[in-house]
Amino acid sequence: MHINSIQFRIRYSETDQMGYAHHGNYAQYFEMGRTEWLRELGISYKKMEEDGIMLPVISLNTNYLKPAKYDDLITLKTTLAKTPTAKIEFYYEIYRGDELLTTATVTLVFVDMKKNRPIRTPKSILDKLK
């Protein structure tokens, strides 16, 4: 199973009055992880869109166990939850050191941009997942 791990610091502009990372930023963190996970396998969002395929989010489920705080060094781990069909589901874990702060799943669907209809996972992507 391919796991991507990225690190970043919580910026001041991403926090609320309590100094905690605002919940609205987490979708962006997950996108960073997902993009890098795909990039490591040689899959580019840009190339998919040039080929007429979109990958919109259809579900986002986040469990906030402990808050991330301003200037924390965060590790975001991204894995594929299961083999994709027309949908692709990612699982995320956010850590501060060894401390698990957040878990999440995000489901996206492959969409033909011309027809604006869901499609099966492109074979080129399935081949790279093997």
Image: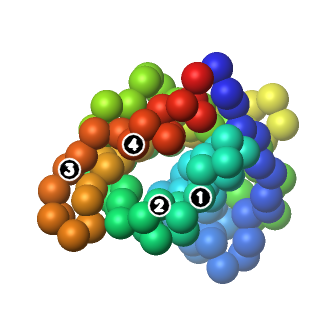
| Closest to the observer, 123 or 16 | 123
Q: Nearer the viewer, residue 37 or 23?
A: 37
Is 26 left or right of 74, judged from the image as shown?
left
Amino acid type, label 2: Met
What is the x, y in percent for residue 69?
71, 57
Identify which residue is drawn at 28% across, 39% down.
Answer: 120
The percent position of residue 35, horizontal first and vertical second, equals 60, 55
Question: Label 4 is placed on what type of residue?
Answer: Pro
> Would you place residue 93 above or below residue 31 in this image?
above
**C-beta proximity under 8 Å, tags 2 and 1:** yes
Q: Earlier in the sequence, mark 1 or mark 3?
A: 1
CA separation in Å, label 2 and label 3: 14 Å
Whole-number angstrom distance, CA of label 4 to CA of label 2? 10 Å
Residue under label 2, please give it: 48
Image quarter (top left, top right, bottom left or bottom right) of the N terminus:
top right
Mark 4 touching mark 2, by CB under 8 A?
Answer: yes
Counting labels gives: 4
Q: For numbered disc 4, what is the local secondary structure?
A: loop
Q: Are marks 1 and 3 in contact (CB under 8 Å)?
A: no
Query: Residue at (67%, 48%) from the top-left corner?
Result: 42
Element on which disc 1 rests: loop
How many other residues sit within 10 Å of disc 4, few (<14), some (14-19) or many (≥20)? Answer: some
The three-letter amino acid code for the residue at tag 3 is Pro
Q: Earlier in the sequence, mark 2 or mark 3?
A: 2
Q: Earlier in the sequence, mark 4 or mark 2?
A: 2
Q: In the shown orientation, is residue 13 left or right of residue 57?
A: right
- Residue picked out by circle 4: 122
Q: Position of residue 55 (x, y in %)?
A: 37, 56
Between the C-alphas of marks 1 and 4, the distance is 13 Å
Instruction: Please name the residue that numbered disc 3 is placed on.
Output: 118
**From what the image shows, is residue 130 above or below residue 12?**
above
